[in-house]
Amino acid sequence: MIRSSRNRWRPFVAGAFALAALSGCPCLVRAADLLDAYRLALAGDPVLSQAEATRQAAREGVGVARGPLLPQVSASLGYARTRTADGAEVGIASPSSSRQPALALSQTLFDLGRLAALRAEQARADSEDASYRAAQQALPVRVAAAYIGVLMAADTLAISQANEDAFVRQVAESEARYRAGLSALVDLDQARAYAASARANTIGARQALDAAHEALAELTGAPLAGLRTLREDASIALPEPADAQAWVGIALQNNPLIQSRRDAVVAAERTIDGARSGHWPTLTAGVDVGRPAVWPADGSGRDGRTIASVGLLLKLPLTDGGTTQSLVRQALAQRDAAQAALEAQRRQVARDVADQFRSVAAGLQQIEATRAAVASAAKALEAMRVGQQTGTRTMTDLLLAIQQLGAAQAAYSQARHRCAYDRLVLLQLAGTVGEADLAALNAQLI
């Protein structure tokens, strides 16, 4: 069995990473990054492997369709034992034996049906090539989604834990103030309620982080710990050209899923040609070479001599009960379905690209807005602490300020990571994403 070089080294790459992770290899002391995750996924992703195998199967279909158009050679050997009813015939001994070795060569000279089938298989193979390219381009985006999902979940857990710690401290302070007679019991009850709610949020955030790690391990085939995080000053810019319709035009030309649909339409049209060929004649040339032998000799003088024959076979179909017409109508309907699928894919990609471009543009604005919100919430919390100590602010005001700061920090984290991911998705829809784009995002990690 022939295996691609990627498949051949896949188990060794994944195994090396897993062994190093289990053995505490010094080479894994540094934090794993996005490219580490991508290379592991590239070595062992079953989705990509399935797409590769499907593509190879389609390519072999071309060879299957080409075979009948190439010379066909066969060898045969026949043996017969003959005995006449009355024991003898004039000029023929009874019983007698005969041997008939033969070599046959045939070549199709004209067969539009088989030629159309070959062209249809070539178009289907091209369609699977495009589908494989789509799977290749989807992999870095899938890895980025899982990796960024871990970072977002880790940030959420850190923020939840910080909120819980802040509320716990507030409970301790409220207890002290209540014992000293400086605050009412309602303030302590409020602090305890917020602390309990924060504790529940922390438990949920920890569970979400574990699930995010499992999702990443599903892609890489091995767990990765200590992931590098997105820099606070990460540079995320709107990709050029800065126009949604320009990106739509790029996607309609380069998106591999659209190309796969185009090739599927071509394959359907070739199938129509093959169906219509049922009304056309076929012409085949043949050469047969034999060396018959009969014993006892029959007196014909042919024993042991080579006999060769050359001929042409012309077949002209007259009627097939309407099968050809039905095949043509079936192929036309399949072509119409393929064209409709192509148009649906084009419209979906156009809509998705425009939406994704707007998401990236809005995401950049959200990063700035949420960054400012975090700064304002932090200042408001400090003011609330001072006001609560001096009696100008209530416990409720302080607790809400702590909660508001956590929400602002979570929104800021979401905006930063989501914008980085949305940019990759835009490049994927445009059909231009690759490892270089993943490396550019990886450079923004610390």
Image (tube, rainbow, N blue to C red):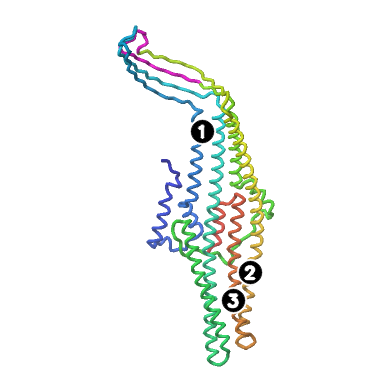
Q: Please state if 16 lies on the left or on the right of 83 as rendered.
A: right
**Which amino acid type is shown beneath numbered disc 3?**
Gln
Q: Nearer the viewer, residue 311 or 406?
A: 311
Q: Residue 129: within the magenta?
A: no
Per the model, the C-alpha gap separating discs 1 and 3 is 68 Å
- On the rendered image, what quadrant is the N terminus found in? top left
> Which residue is tagged 3?
403
| N-terminal label among 1 and 3 | 1
Residue at image coords 61%, 51%: 429
Residue at image coords 47%, 16%: 310
- Say if 42 sits above or below 379 in the image: above
> Which residue is tagged 2?
370
Q: Residue 160: x percent and y percent?
A: 54, 73
Q: Residues within 10 Å of mark 3 (few under 14, many from 20)?
A: many
In what element is the residue under mark 3?
Answer: helix
- Nearer the observer: mark 1 or 3; the answer is 1
- Say if 97 sits above or below 48 in the image: above
Q: Residues within 10 Å of mark 2 (few under 14, many from 20)?
A: many
- Nearer the observer: mark 3 or 2; the answer is 3
Q: Which mark is residue 65?
A: 1
**What stretch of residues is rendered in magenta?**
285-303
**Which amino acid type is shown beneath numbered disc 2?**
Thr
In what element is the residue under mark 1?
Answer: helix
Q: Residue 362: x percent and y percent?
A: 66, 62
Per the model, the C-alpha gap separating discs 3 and 2 is 15 Å
